[in-house]
Amino acid sequence: MNAAYFVSDPVLDCVPAPGGTEESIDALLRAFALQWILKLDRLGSRLARRGAAPAAVARVRGLVSWLVSAPAAGARGVAEEPIFMAWATRLERLIDDLEAEVRGSAGAIERHADHLPLLFLRSLEKIGEGSSEEIACALPGGRGVAPLGLDWQLQSRRGDLAAVLRRAGGGVEILHAGEVLCAVPEGELRPGARGGAVTVVDPDRVAVVPRFFARERRIEILPIDGYPELGERRLPEERPSTLPPSDVEDALGRSLDAIAAVWPDALRDVDAFFRGVLPMWMPDERWNSASTGELPFVLQLTVRETGWPLLLAESILHEASHVKLDMARLMTPLLNNGDEKIYRHPWRPDLRPMSGVLLGAHAFLAVMKLYEHALEKAADERVEREYRLRRGEVGVALKMLNDHARFTPAGQAIYDAMVEVYG
């Protein structure tokens, strides 16, 4: 990004549009990880105040201790794991239920916290400091797998399974009712391990299943039913894609190659803010996409075997921009406007709050720049039509923001930089 686009706070330098420097993106991601460490610390305190099970409190506080003591890159890497963010945001909602005295919430929290050891199995020794040698956990069944932060996962074949993790030599044994289900050697607890050396003692109860990643970018192809946070954002006609992972990988690859060909700097945003995909299908060659601040790094995208690669590319940059702006809003407020839905922006017929106008302008600015860069590479009637359409829409939204937004200093700096990018 041109230096003229930078905002005053280094953490927010990369926010206005894709193409920010690696340093500014790294600063935002490190700040995001720190915010979640602080939030988890507060969640542990809330659990303790509400008299939650000591084991659940210990799980959360043990994770905070590990994240605080871990190298900055390690803590950041944990915070960027889609499964970690799903676990953490669900824990927050369960604690809200506990404080609202929702029936059964205490037991739900304890079960949820028990998923944590398997989530961080490769760091078991550090997470388990101060705890017993055997750590209780739950192994989710069905499609609910227990991610290990590796290239494989353990999955229960018989519903949720109460299990125990036990250190054994340099590795870990996983037991149920005193019987060993599988043994994981030390070498399999390191990033990149593929599960080939895991010994499954009881294959009727436990399976080692692969995690699917798109190319070298480590974009995980996730099971749709494992991430209900995005379900409410699906259109009635939208359906989970039936494409095999290899076809999803190929479609993503063509679109990422298209971005690389016309706007390679934008791939820095893709690498930073796109870690998991929920592939969807839409009828009549239509395209849709979604993301949520409750599940950062995961994008719900229409993925097709055929089609114009720039259509999926614009969805990727659009939703990655939402992820980035949501992170900025976690750091600091951007608007002083209320949540009244009184504004109609160019992309939706319903009335939206001013925050919705900002969100739309920010995401479609990235789409506009994609087509602008594509036009610079080669004249194309379809590209030019898309560029002019998006430029007109973004111009309308920027004027609405100028006329009606009550920005905080950080919000004003981001808006001013967006205007510079718009040109």
Image (tube, rainbow, N blue to C red):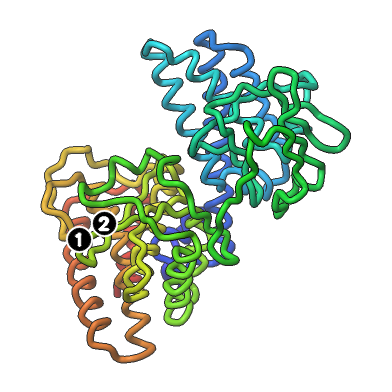
Image coordinates for residue 345, horizontal then vertical, percent: 16, 56
Q: CA distance from mark 2 to mark 1?
A: 8 Å
Q: Disc 2 marks which amino acid?
A: Gly
Along the line of sight, which residue is nearer the eye, 375 or 9? 375
Residue type for callout 1: Ala
Q: Is residue 78 left or right of residue 225?
A: right
Q: In the rendered image, which residue does mark 2 sit on?
A: 360
Q: Does residue 253 appear in this view?
A: yes
Residue 102 or 404: which is nearer the viewer?
102
Rendered view: 5 above or below 375: above
Which label is found at residue 397?
1
Q: Is residue 388 above or below residue 236?
A: below
Circle 2 or circle 1, nearest the eye: 2
Residue occupying image coordinates x 22% and y 53%: 357
Q: Which quarter of the figure has residue 230?
A: top left
Callout 1 secondary element? helix
Where is residue 133 shown, x and y percent of the image?
80, 22
Q: Position of residue 393 (x, y in %)?
A: 19, 67
Label 2–label 1 contact, CB within 8 A: yes
